[in-house]
Image (cartoon, helix red, strand yellow):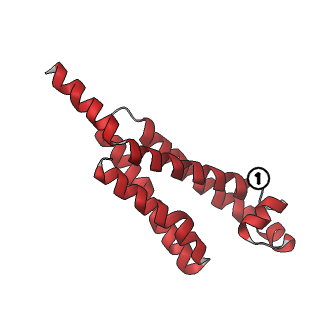
Amino acid sequence: MLASCTFNRLTRARMGFIGATATGLMAGLHGYILVLEMFLWTSPRGRKAFRLTADFAEKTKTLAANQGLYNGFLAAGLVWGLVHPVPEFADQIRLFFLGCIVVAGAYGGATANPRILFIQAVPAAASIAAVLSGY
């Protein structure tokens, strides 16, 4: 029984590498977006990333900070899914937060900027596929 349990854990760890890596990259991306939106929105780097004028960035910095906080929650949820000790529940956590990113990215792509679809939604969907495949 113990050998079987150890084998299953090792097999799962090896097979979930791509899904975990993709999830980690998505967490990193959303952590970076948090920094851009909360702290660098009005800086040259933040304005360049979002293609903003200085005037528009200044007028919208409070809204951007709020958006950045939400991106931080997505990143935190993905990290939680990566570190949770129960693999089956960890996958559920990761799938939930990745699904939230797909929905938010699709909405943002449709209503704000089509780039959002390809920067957030498509990579999150690929991450979901990797998690579900077990690789």
Q: Within 10 angstroms of label 1, few (less than 14), some, or many (20 or more) residues?
A: some
Q: Position of residue 123 (x, y in %)?
A: 48, 61
Q: Residue at x 70, y 58 (%)?
A: 37
Q: Residue at x 51, y 74 (%)?
A: 107
User: Within the image, what quadrant is residue 58 found in?
Assistant: bottom right
Instruction: Please state which of residues 105 and 125 is positioned toward the viewer in this rendering.
Output: 125
Q: Is residue 110 above or below residue 116?
A: below
Q: Position of residue 30 (x, y in %)?
A: 58, 53
Residue furthest to the right in view is 55
Instruction: Please state which of residues 112 and 45 is positioned toward the viewer in this rendering.
Output: 45
Q: Secondary structure at mark 1?
A: loop
Quadrant placement of the N terminus? top left
In the shown orientation, is residue 63 left or right of residue 101?
Answer: right
User: Tag 1: residue type?
Assistant: Phe
Residue bearing mark 1: 39
Q: Position of residue 122 (x, y in %)?
A: 47, 66
